[in-house]
Amino acid sequence: MTAVNQVRSTFTDYFKKNGHEHVESAPLIPRNDATLMFTSAGMVQFKNLFTGNEKRSYTTATTSQKCLRAGGKHNDLDNVGYTARHCTFFEMLGNFSFGDYFKEQAITLAWNLVTKEYGLKKDKLLITVYSEDEEAATLWKKIAGFKDDKIIRIPTSDNFWSAGDTGPCGPCSEIFIDQGDKLQGGPPGSADQDGDRFLEFWNLVFMQFDQLAPGNRVNLPKPSIDTGMGLERMSAILQGVHSIFDTDLFKSLIEASVSETGVAAKGANAPSHRVIADHLRAASFLIADGVLPSNEGRGYVLRRIMRRAMRHAHLLGAKDPLMHRLVPALTRQMGDTYPELIRAQSLIAETLKLEETRFRKTLERGLVLLDDATNNLRKGETLKGDVAFKLYDTYGFPLDLTQDALRPRGIAVDTAGFATSMEKQKDEARKAWKGSGEAATETVWFEIKDKSGPTEFLGYETESAEGEIRALISGGKPAKALNKGDDGAIVVNQTPFYGESGGQEGDVGLIKGAKGALFRVTETQKKLGDVFVHIGKVESGSFKSGDGVELIVDHAKRSATRANHSATHLIHEALRQVLGTHVQQKGSLVNSDRLRFDVSHNKPMSAEELAVVENRANAVIVQNSEVTTRSMAIDDARETGAMA
């Protein structure tokens, strides 16, 4: 048997021997692609190399990339546990050429790895190519010795890759294995191609065109290669099993789940153990990469993943929080390859335990209410959308859990009706926002949030990132564009800029656009809790909604503000030690130049008390201890000793 860790190392070692730079996996949170919620493919971290906007010291690379498909346009969440090959978190093995080698060497490298290093039998393999790519078909005949019956020409977009309506693109060639006639399904391109018999495990993308506009495609000056092999799929093939959940890595996680629950992974219980194993990986890696559960954006996707696993733990009869007890099994399997799991192990376990403890009450109450609401429904019928919305809005039972709970009974949910109820609630909230002057102008942010959603804050991990403009504001109203000399505000989908809150001033810096466009950010505010507004002036060029931009925080000002923020916490603790634990924060001002800390006390402080407080705070500062940032619910933070 070839273990998952061996499959991974065989791939990367092979390409290192063939002159490729081994590049570490990028985080699950893309920093250079504003269109993606999560990293979903190996090429994401190399996007700027493919477009020529970035240069590095190497022209070929290999990676094992952490990927997640559980939100946005890439979403496998609902299928996990019920199929042999779907998972939310997976690893994509890849080799890349940035204008170096092209089709012939890519096919040669792939064929030698598959047949010589991995030892797959040639007669079990078949190839697909794009129907117009005769060059690739000819090369497969030459290199692999295949006849036409082993090379299937596909005329659809399945075998032509593009990042969007414009930009680099090119034909694909996929490698399939025939797993035998005991499994159902036909070859690619046939009516029953979605069966399990013929499994695609490696996709070679020949990036050779630049799509300038629909119908206008030109050759790239330096064609490139982007390949992706599913580690879990290849491991299943080499271990002689038909489900990724029967590979050694997943078996160890499922065994841990069985051990903790006392329920065998058989029959109707098998999908629950698979869901728990997969979602444990997804949740743990997201937390390790800086995502924490919330009600918006990436944090909400994490919460959905965690709660879906927790419902399946409930189905298995777990009476106490389960997920955090499985973290050691995961770190034993994957910690050597991904040391961030070991570094964040305590945070992962603590976050899972807190979330599951809090959610158990919601889950138990919600399941009772759901049973009451669906008692009279039969297989094939549909739960009304307004009922599903009431479960969500009044009792905190999410829509996806309602759908997952009803799935085994064959009952659907009216999602359109759910959306209508959600929109009705938003309309009522807008109508309730009444007033004049400043309050009246705030209504614009409701419109922007409804249309564009919340802003994802990246500032705890980075001071620069790419984003996509979602809204422009000028004179307190939405604007189509901001041009040179215009004062205004920019809202993007994700930002490293901290928005003013909690007494701390927002970040300043630059937003750069195409053709030298430059917007100087002089202030960053938060509206409606999670819409980050970058206020400033266009110094050159112009900006419009939908533009891709680069956001750069003023590092010196951020660092000075951060230091003053930390100092407020030190002063607070020193005040409690000197004056008593009754001292509470009543207000503060934190910026790059100074800090002000307002406290409650029954009399003015003496000069001696001030000196002692100052000395104690400074004594901690000179220790130069590491400072870490964690985003938590306020009740959870207080439980760990935080004060505010």
Image (spheres, grey):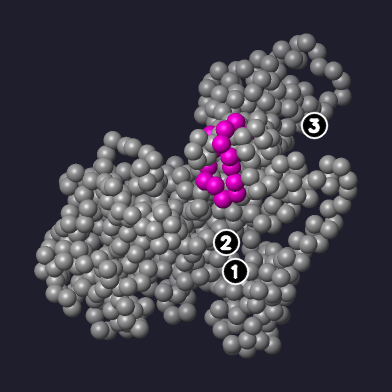
Q: Which mark is residue 81?
A: none
Residue 440: percent from left, percent from top? 84, 47
Classed neighbour count for the residue bearing mark 1: other residues with Cα under 10 Å, few (<14), some (14–19), many (≥20): some
Residue 56: percent from left, percent from top? 32, 37
Q: Which mark is residue 304?
A: 2
Q: Is residue 537 left or right of residue 623?
A: right
Query: Within the image, what quadrant is residue 113 found in?
Result: bottom left
Rendered residue at 35%/83% (across/down)? 192
User: Which mark sits nearer the N-terminus, 1 or 3?
Assistant: 1
Prevailing secondary structure class for the magenta stretch in the rendered image: strand
Residue located farthest toward the top when viewing the structure as drawn: 607
SS of the residue at dot 3?
A: strand
Is the residue 570 above or below the residue 390 in the image? above
> Of tags 1 and 3, which is closer to the observer?
1
Rendered residue at 26%/42% (across/down)? 59
> Which stretch did the figure color magenta?
537-552
Query: Within the image, what quadrant is residue 532 found in?
Result: top right
User: Which mark sits nearer the N-terminus, 2 or 1?
Assistant: 2
The amino acid at mark 1 is: Asp
The count of marks equals: 3
Is the residue 579 above or below the residue 499 in the image? above
Residue beneath disc 3:
586
Residue located farthest toward the front when viewing the structure as drawn: 216
Q: In this view, does 615 lie to the left or right of 22?
A: right
User: Which mark sits nearer the N-terminus, 2 or 3?
Assistant: 2
Classed neighbour count for the residue bearing mark 3: other residues with Cα under 10 Å, few (<14), some (14–19), many (≥20): few
Rendered residue at 59%/88% (across/down)? 379
SS of the residue at dot 2?
A: helix
Classed neighbour count for the residue bearing mark 2: other residues with Cα under 10 Å, few (<14), some (14–19), many (≥20): many
Q: Residue 400 carries which label?
A: 1
Q: Does the residue at mark 1 contact the one at mark 3 (Cβ under 8 Å)?
A: no
